[in-house]
Image: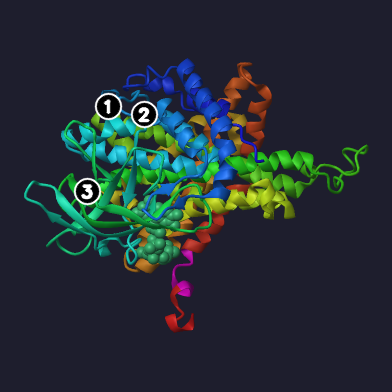
């Protein structure tokens, strides 16, 4: 059975030493999340993930979800008890406001816990993740009555949430959606239409399911400007908060799919279901974006989570599996062969995954911290800068971490040879589970277009200039430190490539938008590499400081210096290839007529 050990020490190092979270103690919740509390929460979450969720992962994949004739859905054995434990343990509400029964702690902690849950059992973690997304939208856009009716029960894990965007003919292009909402005399709406691919749309884990649904109010204009957001509970709540009658929404079928078998992917039929508007009419996309930004960060976390658990298993296998001899002569002459970890190519695979994971975790936590600042800082300028960071980095995290996270599960599978392809070791499940993260919450092509088409030009390029400014200023502060030379030099080259790519797009994509479309994915990955390279510099700087101070685990800190060097020497140079592809423009991509394909 696959193993999993939650990276608690790494998260604590990143929070305390790299990002020095103590600096944020002026923000609500941060002072309460002292070093001791952080360690206690993360260690407890680790225990839950390692002991409860990990053992359910393979069994859940094999058993899958089952739909019954009445439209009800049963999740795999053990999920229900585990979800109760999750709710009772207060995990859903770590960062939810205290007034709704949450613990009011930084969102950063929830994000760290979500990585562990995703590694341990991605299918299970989605029931919680979607609820957190729905909570964010309700808290920000709901009326006080809506908040009172739904939020405390969702925070307690008694009710769960979903997001209903997709329809059979309408995926990426939400402007096409047809689900219809008709206003009733009492202010509510009736919703009619079919939504497909709805994660956690029906299941047996909670007393009620709160669907957030995009629909078009009768008579509203076509396109995304005519789309509104509604809350449509499976069970209609009575005025006293108890459960009333069943609403007219039912799961018509569940999909057979490649992975995440423990998560029910449902066709949801709305047949005059009662719902209430969230936010303003025709502003549904805006309200949904609140949910989607959090969810996109969450999906990026899934990319890392799968890459991490695949790495841990591959590393253990590489130390155990005996095949061949080291090129430099037998390392274990008393054994029939050396363990495959002696082979440079196996090392290449392991180091590639590891060097990505550690920096990706830093990038996620850094961005989660900015999300806390964006929500809670009292200083307008600071809040705006944090919001800019979120807007710019969220699509990078979603797109890059899921593309590379999936690729890394394949690299980890490769370390098992044929044993990775068969089901016994669980590696093929990681590959299958990781694949969806590149598709849902906006396919990765859309993340790339979001960066190039919207985020770069937004506010005259303010967010991008701030990012360039931060990385450049950081490099200057490190210029005199010789030990940082092997890291700062490659980062400077990579940043130069990103700046050249940005300039090229500004000069060549406005008049010819295909140049932007053809280069967008390369630009996103180029951006991701620079951001990860910057994270590695910060990690190395903090590791150096710990080593100089004689603190902490010296072997772990020295390993960071080596892993960071591997990233700089063997991964960051890919920025040059991305730049060359972007600068080649769209001509060869677009020249063939459609009939030629
Ligand atoms: C397991 C699973 C769970 C899901 N969970 C949910 C959920 O909970 N709620 C929900 O609402 N939806 C959910 N989805 C739906 C998912 O978000 C969509 O599948 C996704 O947004 C893509 O839409 P589509 O499948 O219609 O593909 P299409 O939009 O038809 O896209 C097809 C291809 O064309 C490309 N493409 C399309 N438009 C453009 C463009 N403008 N520029 C460049 N390329 C483009 C895409 O990249 C893709 O490669 C889920 C899907 C799956 C499979």
Whereabouts is ligand 1, in terms of quadrant? Answer: bottom left
Q: Position of residue 150 (x, y in %)?
A: 25, 35
222 or 578, which lies in front?
A: 222
Q: Are marks 2 and 3 in contact (CB under 8 Å)?
A: no
Residue 586 forms part of the magenta stretch: yes
Image disc number at residue 79 = none
> Is the residue indicated by label 1 positioned so its CB lies within 8 Å of ligand 1?
no
Residue, x 75% and y 42% (percent of image)?
Answer: 318
Side (left or right) of 567 relative to 252: right
Determine which residue is flagged by label 1: 100
Residue, x 47% and y 45% (percent of image)?
Answer: 75
Compared to 162, does 256 lie above or below?
below
Q: Position of residue 249 (x, y in %)?
A: 28, 52
Residue 372 picture quarter: top left
Compared to 88, does 533 lie above or below?
below
Q: Earlier in the sequence, mark 2 or mark 3?
A: 2
Q: Which residue sits furthest front? A: 69
Determine which residue is flagged by label 3: 230
Determine which residue is flagged by label 2: 93
Q: Which residues are magenta?
A: 583-589
Residue, x 61% and y 30% (percent of image)?
Answer: 482
- Is residue 491 visible in this depiction of the protein? no
Q: Are marks 3 and 1 in contact (CB under 8 Å)?
A: no
490 or 357, which lies in front?
A: 357
Q: Earlier in the sequence, mark 1 or mark 2?
A: 2
């Amino acid at each position: 059975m696959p193993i999993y050990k939650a990276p608690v020490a790494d998260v604590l190092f990143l929070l305390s030493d790299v990002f020095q979270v103590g600096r944020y103690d002026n923000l609500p919740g941060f002072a309460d999340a002292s070093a001791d509390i952080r360690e206690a929460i993360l260690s407890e979450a680790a225990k839950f993930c390692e002991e409860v969720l990990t053992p359910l992962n393979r069994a859940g994949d094999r058993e899958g979800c089952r739909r019954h004739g009445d439209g009800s859905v049963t999740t795999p054995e053990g999920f229900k008890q585990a979800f109760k434990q999750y709710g009772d343990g207060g995990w859903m509400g770590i960062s939810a406001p205290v007034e709704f029964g949450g613990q009011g702690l930084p969102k950063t902690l929830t994000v760290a816990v979500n990585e562990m849950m995703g590694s341990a059992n991605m299918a299970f973690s989605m029931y919680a993740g979607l609820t957190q997304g729905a909570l964010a939208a309700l808290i920000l856009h709901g009326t006080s009555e809506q908040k009172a009716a739904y939020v405390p029960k969702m925070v307690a894990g008694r009710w769960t949430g979903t997001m209903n965007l997709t329809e059979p003919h309408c995926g990426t292009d939400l402007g096409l959606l047809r689900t219809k909402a008709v206003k009733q005399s009492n202010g509510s709406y009736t919703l009619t239409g079919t939504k497909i691919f709805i994660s956690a749309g029906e299941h047996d884990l909670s007393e009620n399911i709160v669907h957030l649904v995009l629909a078009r109010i009768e008579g509203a204009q076509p396109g995304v400007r005519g789309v509104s957001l509604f809350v449509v509970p499976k069970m209609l709540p009575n005025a006293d908060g108890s459960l009333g009658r069943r609403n007219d929404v039912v799961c018509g079928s569940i999909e057979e799919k490649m992975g995440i078998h423990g998560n029910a992917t449902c066709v949801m039929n709305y047949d005059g279901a009662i719902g209430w508007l969230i936010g303003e009419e025709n502003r549904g996309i805006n309200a949904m974006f609140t949910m989607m930004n959090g969810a996109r960060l969450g999906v990026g976390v899934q990319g890392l989570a799968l890459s991490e658990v695949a790495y841990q298993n591959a590393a253990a296998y590489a130390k155990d599996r005996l095949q061949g001899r080291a090129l430099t002569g037998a390392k274990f002459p008393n054994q029939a062969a050396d363990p495959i970890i002696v082979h440079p190519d196996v090392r290449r695979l392991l180091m590639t995954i590891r060097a990505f994971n550690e920096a990706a975790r830093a990038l996620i936590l850094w961005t989660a911290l900015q999300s806390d600042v964006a929500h809670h800082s009292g200083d307008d300028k600071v809040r705006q800068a944090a919001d800019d960071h979120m807007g710019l980095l969220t699509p990078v995290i979603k797109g890059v971490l899921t593309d590379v996270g999936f690729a890394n599960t394949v690299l980890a599978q490769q370390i098992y040879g044929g044993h990775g392809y068969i089901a016994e070791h669980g590696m093929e499940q990681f590959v299958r589970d990781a694949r969806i993260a590149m598709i849902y919450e906006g396919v990765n092509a859309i993340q790339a277009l979001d960066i190039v088409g919207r985020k770069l030009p937004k506010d005259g390029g303010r967010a991008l200039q701030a990012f360039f400014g931060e990385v450049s200023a950081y490099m200057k502060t490190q210029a005199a430190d010789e030990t940082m030379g092997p890291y700062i030099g490659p980062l400077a080259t990579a940043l130069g490539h990103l700046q050249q790519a940005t300039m090229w797009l500004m000069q060549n994509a406005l008049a010819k938008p295909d140049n932007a479309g053809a280069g967008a994915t390369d630009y996103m990955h180029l951006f991701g590499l620079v951001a990860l390279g910057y994270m590695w510099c910060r990690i190395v700087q903090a590791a150096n400081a710990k080593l100089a101070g004689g603190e902490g685990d010296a072997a772990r800190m020295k390993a960071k210096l080596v892993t960071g060097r591997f990233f700089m020497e063997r991964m960051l140079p890919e920025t040059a290839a991305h730049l060359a592809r972007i600068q080649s423009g769209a001509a060869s991509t677009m020249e063939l007529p459609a009939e030629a394909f």
